[in-house]
Image (tube, rainbow, N blue to C red):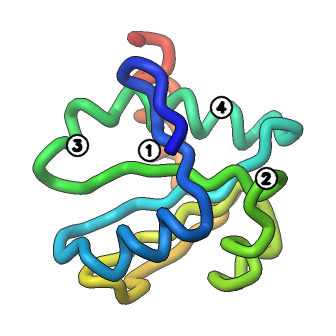
Amino acid sequence: MEEAGSGLPDLSTAELEALLAREEGMVLVSFWAPSCEPCRGVRRGLEALRERAEGICRLVAVNVEQEPEAAWRHGVWKLPTLVFFKGGVELYRIRAGALPASVRRTLGRAAHEA
């Protein structure tokens, strides 16, 4: 697992599957790619929110350029995509471009505050 400071950890496919198999609480997985500008913006916002989410929701990321199998396993075809899991079961997914305006504003504010 790649993690720098308080940033969002990038998981390998195996690490993601292991986390989803053992984690009973809420997990938000951001499927992203460094070459995707909207992905980088969402990532900055999630990194800024990570500390506040502690104890409520675990935030992790998967770089699909390095881990295409993870995207394939979870049916991720467009980026950025956020997928919420609980107890290893997918609860909800959204493409970040389809985020409600209030969520986009929150992520934007969090990124600028960081």
Q: Position of residue 22 (x, y in %)?
A: 26, 76
Q: Residue at x 50, y 45 (%)?
A: 1
Q: Name the amino acid, label 1.
A: Ser
Compared to 96, does 69 lie above or below?
below
The secondary structure type at the circle numbered 1 is helix
Q: Earlier in the sequence, mark 2 or mark 3?
A: 3
| Residue placed under numbered mark 4 in the picture | 41
Left or right placement of residue 75 versus residue 22 in this view: right
Q: Nearer the viewer, residue 107 or 62?
A: 62
Q: Position of residue 96 (x, y in %)?
A: 64, 55
| Residue placed under numbered mark 3 in the picture | 53
Q: CA distance from mark 2 to mark 4?
A: 19 Å
Q: Earlier in the sequence, mark 4 or mark 3?
A: 4
Which of discs 2 and 4 lies nearer the camera? The answer is 2
Q: Name the amino acid, label 3.
A: Ala
Q: Are marks 4 and 1 in contact (CB under 8 Å)?
A: no
Q: Name the amino acid, label 2.
A: Gln
Q: CA distance from mark 2 to mark 3?
A: 26 Å
Q: Quadrant of the C terminus?
A: top left
| Residue placed under numbered mark 2 in the picture | 66
Q: Residue at x 55, y 62 (%)?
A: 82
Q: CA distance from mark 3 to mark 1?
A: 17 Å
Q: Residue at x 60, y 39 (%)?
A: 42
Q: CA distance from mark 2 to mark 1?
A: 31 Å
Q: Residue at x 78, y 46 (%)?
A: 33
| Residue placed under numbered mark 1 in the picture | 102
Residue 43: assigned label: none
Callout 2: 10 Å neighbours few (<14), some, many (20+)?
some
Which of discs 3 and 1 lies nearer the camera? The answer is 3
Q: Are marks 2 and 3 in contact (CB under 8 Å)?
A: no
Callout 4: 10 Å neighbours few (<14), some, many (20+)?
some
